[in-house]
Each structure stands twice: as C-alpha cells, then as structure tokens.
Amino acid sequence: MTSFLDMNQSPAEQCYQHIRKVIDKDIIILFDSIEKFIFQNVDHGLILSLIPQWVVDYGISPELNSNKDLYEKLRCRATHPIFGRCIYFYDLLGKVSALQDRLSAVILFMRHFYSEVPCKAHYEESQYTSGVKCNGERETDAHMFLNSIFVAYASAFDLISKIAVEQFEFDNYDFGKYKKMKSVHTLYKKSLNKIDSSLKAENMLFFEPPIIRKIISFRDEFVHNGPWDFRCSVYCTAVDGKPADEIIYSPDMDELGNFMASGSRNKFYSQANRINIQLPDLINEATIVLKNTINQISELYKQKTNLCIDKQFTKECLDAIGEYFENQVRLQTMQPHS
C-alpha cells in the first residue's frame, strides 16, 4: 500500500495523490477499454468524427441548444444501428466522466475540510485531560465538507455499479432500437444482480468490505438523519492545560462498518473515533477497492475485444451516416421559407 505514497507528505496529500492516479490512469484505461470494445469491428475514429453532434451532446450537455422533442425527432430519422451504438457509447461515457468528477470532488472537499481542521494528531486520544466544544461558522463548514466527502464517494459506488451492469448486459442490446441504458435505475448494493461474478471477489466493491459499508453508513446518516451532534462541533482538546489537538468525533461502528444502534439511538461515542485523523486512511483503503474494481471491469471489456476492423461494415456505417445527412439537407430544403 506504500508504493503510491511519499512519506514526506501529509496523510491528506498522500490521499489526494492516490485518488488522482485512479482518475488520471485507471479510469482513462477503463474509457479506452470501453471504446475499443464497443467499436471493435469498425473504424471508430472515422465513425465518431462524422457522427452528428446531437448524438454527442443532446440530453447530455448544454453544448447545443436542444429539447426532448427535437432529440426524439432526430433519433427517429437515424435508423441504422451505428447511431444507436454511438448514442449508447456517449451515454456510457457520461457515467465514466461522472465517476472522474465524483472522485475529483472528494479531493476538493477534503482540501476544504483540512483547511478547517488538522489531519494529524499530536497525542493519543487517551492523553487528553480536558476539552472545549466549539460551534460556529468554521465548525459548520468543516462538518459540511466532511459529509460532502462521503456523499461524493458513495455516489462513485452508484456510478461503478451502472458501468458494471452495462458491461454484463451489452450483448442484450439491439442498437437499431436503442433508447436507454439497462442500468438506468441501478444503484449500488452488495447483492446487485447482472454483473460479472469476478466483481464480487474479495477486495472488490461488490464484496463490500467493511470500509465500503463505513462510507455508505456515513453518507446515509448525513443524508437521512442529519449531523452527528446537536450542533456541528469541533473539540479543542488540552493535555494538562496546554492546547493539544482539534478533533471531530464520529459515532461508534461495528466490525462490518455499521453504526452501533440501540432502538432509535445510533450515535454512541465510546470508541473515541477521531474522524479528521482517521479519514485519509479510510479514503485510501476505499480507493484501493475502487481501483481494483475499475481495473477488473476494464479487463472484462478487454477479454471480449477483438480488434479486427470489418471494412465492409465500416463502409455500411459510413454510407448510413452519409445518407442521414443527405436526408437532413433534403428535409431542410423542403421546409417553407418564412
């Protein structure tokens, strides 16, 4: 686990570096694997350079002025399966890009969080002899950034789940009739069906190691039940009257990553979990699981890829694109001038 770390860096900086490598390397490899798989029998560079721009942007980005009715009208005119395949490709690319965005957001929120509180402790928790509970704008900011880290990271689990389902379901698509992704309603869960069994191996996301359950527990508690305290608090501790560490405490958890609960109460603090000190290790551990899962999905795509261009099919696709544009020009010239 130390190969990606510079031990001269702070724990937080080590964490940012680890996540950044997943964003800049592993997810790029995933994108490349998806692109080669989906277009393995055509000259995809040529196809994608000629495909209408609405295929890329309508309903995905604000790059072009569009609405639902116009998209559906254009989609009905593009009947060859290559259009459906390209629409699907950009739908899936949107999930991969969103995965990068979520992990980038984790880095951003962590940087803001650690501008408010430290990531290192100078003392063991048992050494504190006193402390003061601090509430205010700074403490609220710290808690909001902290909870945003867990929300963004857990969102990455949902996105990986969608990509995993798409990898498994690809052969069931008829791109001549493609409308939407089969994973459109998919959210992360350990028991998710219709994914490759290799993604449920140990140290994979769908094995759900305790670190993954911890992040989900933190996210769910914040989203559904609110903050961890009556007010967002930072504890300024002391040892024998001298200032020690600034701490945010998080609730007790069991060995599986669930909050310890009794009836309606699930915020006990006997474990003295110092979340601002523990967070970099938690995120690093979770990032290893994400990296393993992303790399395995890439491998699954690679295993089903045979890079052999079918020149005849490529010509058929190019002819279909050319015919589409000719029909568009013909329809425009037939419209009455105002």
Image (tube, grey):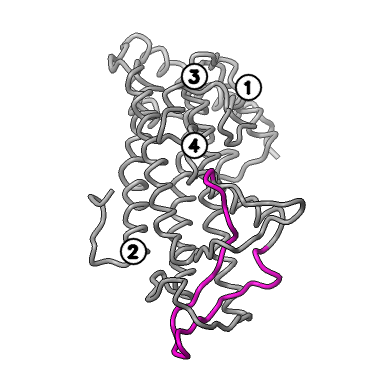
Residue drawn where x is 60% and y is 49% of the image: 217
Residue drawn where x is 68% and y is 55% of the image: 266
- Answer yes or no: do the residues labelled 3 and 1 have beta carbons within 8 Å? no
In the depicted structure, whether residue 290 falls above or below residue 192: below
- The C terminus lies in which quarter of the figure? top right
Looking at the rendered structure, the kind of residue marked 2 is Glu
**Secondary element at image label 2:** helix
- Answer yes or no: do the residues labelled 4 and 2 have beta carbons within 8 Å? no
Q: Nearer the viewer, mark 2 or mark 1?
A: 2
Crowding at dot 3, Cα within 10 Å, few <14 / some 14-19 / many 20+, comes out as few
Per the image, the residue denoted by label 4 is 160
Crowding at dot 4, Cα within 10 Å, few <14 / some 14-19 / many 20+, comes out as many
Residue drawn where x is 59% and y is 47% of the image: 258
Q: Is residue 52 visible?
A: no
**Secondary element at image label 4:** helix
Range of residues picked out in magenta: 227-256
Looking at the rendered structure, the kind of residue marked 1 is Cys
Q: Quadrant of residue 277?
A: bottom left
Q: Position of residue 289 (x, y in %)?
A: 41, 41
Q: Position of residue 54 (x, y in %)?
A: 54, 35
Query: Which numbered disc covers residue 76?
Result: 1
Query: Which numbered disc covers residue 13?
Result: 2
Outermost residue toward the bottom?
241
Q: CA distance from mark 3 to mark 4?
A: 15 Å
Q: Nearer the viewer, residue 200 or 24?
A: 200
Q: Is residue 138 left or right of residue 337?
A: left
